Amino acid sequence: MFCALYLDLYFSERANDGSSPTGQSPQNISNLESSLLGALKLIMLIGLVVISFGPSYSYTLLNLLYGGRYSDGEATAVLRYYCVYIICLAMNGTSEAFLHSVANENQLKQSNDMLLLFSAIYIVLNVFFIKSAGAVGLIAANSVNMLLRITYSAVFIKDYFKGSFSFRRCLPAGWGVLLISGVTTAFSERMFLNRNRFKKTLPVHMAIGVMCLVLSLTEIYRGEKQFLLSIVKSFKGNDKHA
């Protein structure tokens, strides 16, 4: 909630920075586009890391923290699906924050109407999904709701920037390596991690995960070095003004 509020204020400040009474200046539009692109790329970067390693190590985390009593139950499946849901939640928060910051009164009313429709769909999906899949169904219903809202915001963003905004540019460098790492760690959990001999087989599974993580982070740093440094400078600048 606080992140969404911060992004709302951030985009509002960008939208009003240097705008003329007759509308947004080309430079201001360009700044808004760059800000949105950076925010979405950062969200995608964090989300892809979570998706690549979270599901394959959900069982391991729960077993280490709470033992087999919880890790062998539904909790592992719920945590795995929640890792995927996180990126949907973050993408929706960022895209809706932008929409609410730059939309006019009529566009906001239309957005609220669509949110009511999506909420109605969400309630119906909740009933069916929870009955069929329990807690996992609840996460699935929330994910579908987020995807509907993201799609609506994406259409708005495309129209706002006259089609010049490309969501492909939000994919960070190294995303392919992250996906390969996700497949590798999933294979490692299935082939090497034995739940009956958890402590003996865990080191191999962890070593493969660490290796994949190091390779992924190295590739990301090579491709996104300037982007990551700009984020660090931005945080340092905010600390100085605080």
Image (tube, rainbow, N blue to C red):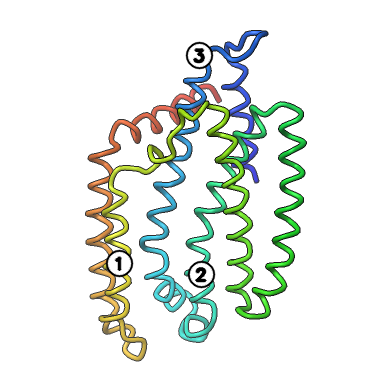
Residue at 63% across, 13% down: 23
Mark 2 residue type: Leu
Give the mark, 1 or 2, whose residue is nearer the N terminus.
2
Mark 3 residue type: Pro
Q: Which mark is residue 62?
A: none
Residue at 50% across, 75% down: 77
Q: Secondary structure at mark 2?
A: helix
Q: Give the residue at mark 3.
A: 26
What percent of the width, then of the height, locates residue 159?
Answer: 57, 31
Query: 137 or 208, which is in the foreground?
Result: 137
Query: 111 or 82, which is in the foreground?
Result: 111
Query: 20 or 106, which is in the foreground?
Result: 106
Q: Are marks 3 and 1 in contact (CB under 8 Å)?
A: no
Is 221 rendered above or below residue 21?
A: below
Which residue appears farthest toward the bottom when viewing the image?
196
Q: Could you say which quadrant of the image residue 109 lies in?
A: top right
What percent of the width, then of the height, locates residue 110?
Answer: 74, 38
Give the mark, 3 or 2, whose residue is nearer the N terminus.
3
Q: Give the residue at mark 1.
A: 183
Query: Disc 3 vs disc 2: which is toward the camera?
Result: 3
Q: Give the residue at mark 2.
A: 79
* CA–CA distance in space, label 3 to label 1: 43 Å
Query: 63 or 142, which is in the foreground?
Result: 142
What percent of the width, then of the height, locates residue 158?
Answer: 53, 34
